[in-house]
Amino acid sequence: MGASESGPAQDSDEEARRRLNAYTYLSAPERLEHVAIMRVFCGTLLADLAVPDIMVKLRQAGTFAAGLDADTLTVRLEQLVAWGNLLRSSRTVNASSISEYQRSRSRYQLSKLGERIQRDADGVLTEADAAREVSNELLALVERGLRELADLVTAPGGVEPQEGLERISTLFVQFAEFADSIRDFYAYLGQVLSRYDLDSAEYQGFKELLLDYVEAITEDVAFRAPRISAALDTLWPHIPALLDRLDSHAQGLNGISTQAQSESRPDIRIQRSRGREFADWEGLRGWFCNIDGRGSQVDQLRDATLRALQSLLANAKRMLRSATGEMSRRKDLLRLARWFDEAAPRDAHDIAVAAFGLYGARHLGIPPATDEVVPAYTSWWTGPVVEVPVALRERGSRAQRGRASAVEDHSAQKRLLREAARQRAAARAAAADELRSASGRFADVRLTSAALGLLLELLATALGNAQLSRPVSTDGVRTAGFDLESASSEDAELRIRLTVRRTAGTRTMLYSADGDLLLDDLELDIGRTSAAVDGEAEASVS
């Protein structure tokens, strides 16, 4: 396979992997906390929230995550960002201190993929087990809408673009709702009919459901499907021209997609409304018509109804055999289970022996420990446990089998760890080079996130190492305020040194991808470490 073929396939696999990672929070150990956090973001529109705002909303909702502290909540939010469910906000932050800046810049907003996944998850959590009614009346509206649209399109002059747009949007919304209700109902029906423990009352209820409700659905679909197919056959030759006319009347977001393609920007993709693409009409026609011998959804609906009736008949046969004593002991087993549930532990063992005739295994031929003297009348149930070797327990022999396994090879993991360490070191070295090149002209450059993080790390160390002293006036009296002495920090491995000087009236502005940071009365000077320090660092490494 050439590079031109493998490239798009790899990109597609990577995109699929990225989207599937967004589902990880639903199976993580902290999934209840993650779901509560995502519901807070789904309750807002185009809003970015900081950690304190999220904590207030969680307490107001009274959810499982209401007791999270700020540090734990930050960890959960960062994990959701890594999975792609949340995004970092790009709002400019004004802060009076470094700690306030670091807290305030951690603002988050919902991603489109995260909102879609959480919306589907809430639907599963609230309505997954319910029996959904089939919107059968929508099928009549779909038939009427297709016939009226076919009459308007085939009339002289055609349909007005705005009226055609309204009719098509309404038509596909009705069809989508009907098709979804059909799928949900038959999925519930298959779950019910797969049970083989139905009693007479449950069987009677599901029998009426099948014979009355399902029959009404299939009869209505079978009655209206030929009429819908005829309307689609009349409308089909005019669909391409109709779609072109609608696009010329109202492009919607498709104009943005066309402009992005002309500017070679494939990152902007548009999902058009139902009915604006020819593929939507092909799906609608394939639901009611048998195209190219692939079968229609109407045929599948008829086959599913037949299988449901067969499952109902199988349950009826099982219940008849159970009534004549030929098959099920369901009632007896339920009574026995109730005895187990109500009995004490000692009585439960006696019931199990009486019901099944099964006794616990006795391990013979293995002497107990030398310091334990067990009387002969001691029951094995209450006596001390004897450790049985695995070989004797599984194979009945003490002999060792096979050969010793080889030492596991961890070279691949070591290579991955070395590569990860090398990449981290390279990223920090690049950040150090960026800071050294930007020294003295911070107002003219925009730092990357890695460079700003390294600068904040050096600045915090320098301020922690600084010595504060009161300045002395010319007459020997100490004045108010403090001066910085020896306010510097360095990283011998990166060969970078930061010197901080306090100068009244100075304003140092740092621009970065994560926001802007203003330092009052502080000047920053970044340079390389001295040769002596470099030599000591190299000697220590060697």
Image (cartoon, rainbow, N blue to C red):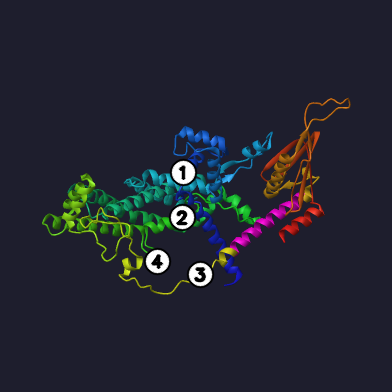
Identify the residue at horizontal 72%, vertical 45% (top origin): 458
* Nearest to N terminus: mark 2 or mark 3: 2
| Marker disc for residue 280 | 2
The amino acid type, in three-letter code, at marker 1 is: Val
Nearest the viewer among 194 and 243 is 194
What separation in Å lies between label 3 and label 1 (alpha carbons)?
A: 43 Å
Q: Magenta region: which residues?
A: 415-435
- Sequence order check, earlier mark of 1 and 2: 1
Contact check, label 3 and label 1, Cβ < 8 Å: no
Q: Secondary structure at mark 2?
A: helix
492 or 280: nearer the viewer: 492
Q: Is residue 35 left or right of residue 478?
A: left
The residue labelled by disc 3 is 407
Query: Callout 1: helix, strand or loop?
Result: helix
CA–CA distance in space, label 2 to label 3? 58 Å
Q: Amino acid at mark 3?
A: Val
**Nearest-to-viewer mark from 1 and 4:** 1
Left or right, residue 307 beside residue 481: left
Q: Residue under label 1, please give it.
A: 35
Q: Is residue 402 magenta?
A: no
Q: Nearer the viewer, mark 3 or mark 4?
A: 3
Are there few (<14), some (14-19), or many (20+) residues within 10 Å of tag 3? few
Q: Does dot 4 land on a helix, a strand or a loop?
A: loop
Type of residue at label 2? Asp
Q: Position of residue 470 (x, y in %)?
A: 79, 30
Q: Quick one: label 2, few (<14), some, or many (20+) residues within 10 Å?
A: some
Query: Is 283 on the left-hand or right-hand side of 541?
Result: left
Name the spot of residue 152 as percent of width and height, x first: 44, 49
**Sequence-wise first label, 3 or 1:** 1
The numbered dot on residue 292 is 4
Which circle's residue, 1 or 4, is located before the other in the chain? 1
| Residue 1 x, y percent position in the rendering | 57, 72
